[in-house]
Structures are given as C-alpha cells and as structure tokens.
Image (cartoon, rainbow, N blue to C red):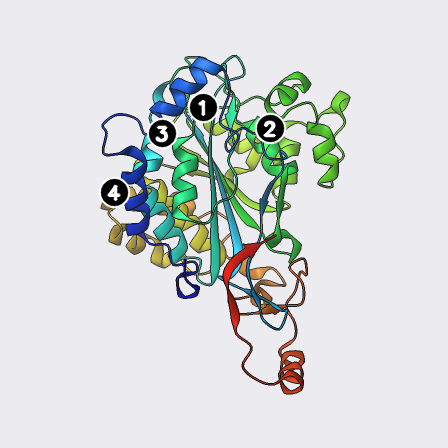
C-alpha cells in the first residue's frame, strides 16, 4: 500500500476480499474453519480468545520520517467490537455479517470522519458448547477483517436459554487495550443477540476460554480480578462503559431478553435490531448520534437513504432516541484528538508534538524531510 493509500479502504475493496476468500463458492464462508475446529477441537490463533497474548489492542498506525519523527498515517484509531449470537435462530448471523461487511465498514466510517476504523467481530455460543467464544484482533484492513470473519466458528445450534455473551463482554472490559482510552475518549462495543445471558461468571469457564493466565493478563492490563469473587455481569458492563460506548442490539421482541439486558445495560443502551441484515445501518446511526455527526432529526432520512424501509426506519429511530446522544462529543478531549499527519517524537507517545515545536525544528534542520514508505503501529 502506497503512502497515498493509507486508510483508503472502500466498499469495493471489501467486496473483492470477500470474493477472494470465498472463491465464489456457495455455502458458509466459515465452512473450512468450522470443519477444522470440529476435527481438531481448536480455533485458529487469530480468533482464539487465548491466542496472541490474550489482550486485544487498538493502536495508531505510523510512518517513520527521515528526521526520526513518527507521522500518524490515518487518524485516531477507533475500535469497534461486535459479538454475534450464533445459536439456533441466529445461526446464520456470521454469514450475514460477512455479506453486509462492505456496508458495515462504509457506513460506520461515514459517521467517523478523521478516525482510523478498526474492527473486531467475534461470535459467541453457550458454555455447554465445544466453543464458547471467538474473539479476533482489532483489524484495520479489508484483507485482515475479512480473514478474521472467515475464521469464525459459529455454533449454529442451541435451543437453551440463557446464553453466554457475558464471557465476551468480560474480555472487552478487562482484556482490551486501546489508544483511544488513553486520550480520554471511548470506542464502540455491540452485543447482537436475541436471548438473555446469565448474571454470573464462572472461574473455570474463564480459564477454559481465555487460558490459565486470564487473571494475570487482566492484572497486566490494569484490572485486579479475584477468581474467588468474580464481578457480576452488571459490574462487568459498568467497567466496560468506562472505556467504550456499549450497546445491546436486540433481535426479535422477547420480553425476557429485553428485561435482562435493560437491567444489565440500562434501557437507553438496548436497541431494536429488526434484522441482522440491518446491522450496518443501525450501528452507523448509533455511532453517528454518539459522535455528534448525526442528529436525531437526520436519522430517519439517513436510514431511508441506506435501504431501510419507511416502517423500519421509524422503528429504529424511536429505539435510538433514548441513547446518550452526543456523549463522545461532550468528552473533554474530543476536539483535541490527533489527526492524520500529526507528528510524534515516539510511537509510544500519547499526544503529538505541538505545531510550534515542529516549526522550530524545521528551521533548525532545514525543510524537505519526507516520510519513509511503510506503516508501523505499536
């Protein structure tokens, strides 16, 4: 990717990557991953919650310049994590997520101007299943995002209620390290489900999912979790809300599901999702309202312009009307967030160099320093 192409992913690049990964074959794009998992009992390391050091990171992309400074290549990284229910009635949610991925990226990016959108879409099942959770890395290129989705192992089974997305929410709360949190802003987190979860976590299940070092990794990430006194699901969500704008997108109108998630997340964070096919439009509306790039009067038109029926658009607009609108824009550092082209002394610095310092340095060193090719991130 050339310097001019940094961050220039489009719907077309995602469509091409999906074709490349599926080879034009009919059937689930995850079929190969499902077969391997069934045979070996293991997940690919890229989507194994215990893989790659357990902690998932969202970090800036940089270009190193000849003068030793580091240039932000795209913008402030914006992590968006989704966990998809793949049991029984939602058995095809991963297939749908791949199908709508070009719109998911495009519409979310349209309401996140100046950000580097980084996506991590995982799936969950039940604790009695062979695989409870798939959790990928935060990826920023079409190739990596599509690859991660095709490595998922959806359960496509179930029949029991409640289900177990709260183990994925645990990872989002305690096993996630994001640059955006370090500058006082928040990423986005969505649980997409049609069923309630449980109020309690189990130590053995956490170890089974995240590995024997799960509590050590949480401590390394700044969270002291005591195995003998695990937080409730409600407490985990409250911790998650410290670093992310988190929501439940509820598919189907089940009163027990609404009651559970309303109790855990609050009524303002439980949103109707008429169909998983509408995931891109609903998420983009929620993100746009939270960022302040959409206002409530624009939402219905935004949805209608993006292939949502008049009836569903009105229903979705009513559902999102109660979310904390403008919450991101109200955070103190919102207008200070780094942008593409900002310069840093070190890749590990939180804030860029003040422009006045750059001017002084340019006068001393002479003009003409040019970025080297190649992007690096922390």
Gap between marks 2 and 4, in whole Å? 43 Å
Badge 4: residue crowd in 10 Å (few <14, some 14–19, many ≥20): few
Give the residue number, with chain letter if any, for mark 2: 50
Give the residue number, with chain letter if any, for mark 1: 195
Among numbered discs 2 and 4, the one appearing first in the sequence: 2
Of residues 155 and 268, which is closer to you in this image? 155
Mark in front: 4 vs 1:
1
Dot 3 falls on a residue whose secondary structure is helix
| Residue at position x 77%, y 20% in the image | 228
Badge 1: residue crowd in 10 Å (few <14, some 14–19, many ≥20): many
| Residue at position x 30%, y 26% in the image | 28
Give the residue number, with chain letter if any, for mark 4: 311
Badge 3: residue crowd in 10 Å (few <14, some 14–19, many ≥20): many
Q: Quadrant of residue 54?
A: top right
Of residues 73 and 338, which is closer to you in this image? 73
Gap between marks 4 and 1, in whole Å? 24 Å
Q: Residue 275, can we see it?
A: no
């Amino acid at each position: 990717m050339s310097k001019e192409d940094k961050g220039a992913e489009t719907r077309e690049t995602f469509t091409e990557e999906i074709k490349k990964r599926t080879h034009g074959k009919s059937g689930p794009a995850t079929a190969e991953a499902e077969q391997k998992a069934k045979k070996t009992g293991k997940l690919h390391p890229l989507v194994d919650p215990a893989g790659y050091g357990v902690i998932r990171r969202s970090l800036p992309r940089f270009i190193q310049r000849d003068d030793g400074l580091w240039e932000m290549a795209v913008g402030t990284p914006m992590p968006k994590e989704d966990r998809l229910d793949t049991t029984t009635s939602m058995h095809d949610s991963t297939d749908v997520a791949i199908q709508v991925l070009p719109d998911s990226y495009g519409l979310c990016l349209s309401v996140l101007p100046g950000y580097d959108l980084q996506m991590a879409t995982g799936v969950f099942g039940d604790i009695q299943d062979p695989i409870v959770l798939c959790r990928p890395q935060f990826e920023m290129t079409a190739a990596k995002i599509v690859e991660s989705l095709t490595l998922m192992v959806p359960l496509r089974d179930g029949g029991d209620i409640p289900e177990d997305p709260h183990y994925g929410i645990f990872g989002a709360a305690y096993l996630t390290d994001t640059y955006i949190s370090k500058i006082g802003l928040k990423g986005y987190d969505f649980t997409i489900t049609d069923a309630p979860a449980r109020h309690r976590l189990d130590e053995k299940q956490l170890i089974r999912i995240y590995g024997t070092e799960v509590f050590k990794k949480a401590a390394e990430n700044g969270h002291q979790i005591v195995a003998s006194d695990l937080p409730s699901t409600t407490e985990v969500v409250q911790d998650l809300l410290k670093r992310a704008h988190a929501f439940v997108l509820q598919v189907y109108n089940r009163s027990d599901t609404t009651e559970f998630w309303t109790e855990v997340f609050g009524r303002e964070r439980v949103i109707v999702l008429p169909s998983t096919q509408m995931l891109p439009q609903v998420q983009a509306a929620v993100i746009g309202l939270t960022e302040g790039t959409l206002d409530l009067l624009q939402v219905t038109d935004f949805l209608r312009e993006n292939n949502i029926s008049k009836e569903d658009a009105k229903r979705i607009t009513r559902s999102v009307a109660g979310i904390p609108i403008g919450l991101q824009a109200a955070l103190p550092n919102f207008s200070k967030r780094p942008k593409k082209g900002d310069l840093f002394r070190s890749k590990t610095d939180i804030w860029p160099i003040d422009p006045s310092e750059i001017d002084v340095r340019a006068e001393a060193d002479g003009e003409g320093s040019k970025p080297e090719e190649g992007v690096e991130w922390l």
